[in-house]
Image (cartoon, rainbow, N blue to C red):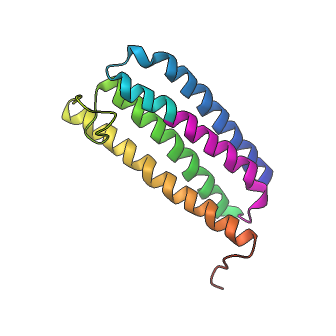
Amino acid sequence: MTSLDISYRLSLAGVLLLFLALLTGGAVPHLVNPRMGLAAHTTGIQCALVLIAFGVLWPKLRVAGVAARLTYVVNVAGAYALWLAFVLGAALGAGRAAPISGAGHEASAAAEAVFACVLYLGVVSSVVGTAAVLLALARARGLWQAAA
């Protein structure tokens, strides 16, 4: 994949997530936990905008090969996992792992475990992916040099 391919794919993934988040907003009143549904809607929009921004930034980064693919996959997976976790939590009524949006809701142990796993996967992936973009951006301007 070239730099422009990854830029395009990040932007496309972002616009698709934006579309899904907008649809999620329409489902909010029909979910078991509407407050978490609203969190899914806003999280999806925010993650979509981050993916689009990374798509715009990508040509300025000096990332290639396996590192480029991993950075792309981790960022897209993290964004979608965060949105999906809140959608699942809202639909299943799970909320232990997100005490603010999940207040007053508790689902079966299995539903809570799935919600927590997907949420934590999204958090870790997003942090790692964003750190990779930050380091690549710093390297592109000579602010940080990798060990030779």
Name the spot of residue 88 as percent of width and height, x first: 38, 30
Out of 13 and 139, give the one closest to the viewer.
Answer: 139
Depicted 67 relative to depicted 81: above or below: below
The residue located at (27%, 40%) in the rendering is: 113
Report whether 37 appears left or right of 127.
left
User: So how many labels did they put on this image?
Assistant: 0
Q: For residue 22, what is the image quadrant?
A: top right
Depicted 38 relative to depicted 27: above or below: below
Q: Main secondary structure of the magenta part?
A: helix
Q: Residue furthest toward the top?
A: 30
In magenta segment, residue 130:
no
The residue located at (70%, 63%) in the rendering is: 65
In magenta segment, residue 55:
yes
Name the spot of residue 75 as percent of width and height, x first: 57, 50
Give the magenta range: 43-63
Q: Residue furthest toward the bottom?
A: 148
Out of 147 and 131, give the one closest to the viewer.
Answer: 131
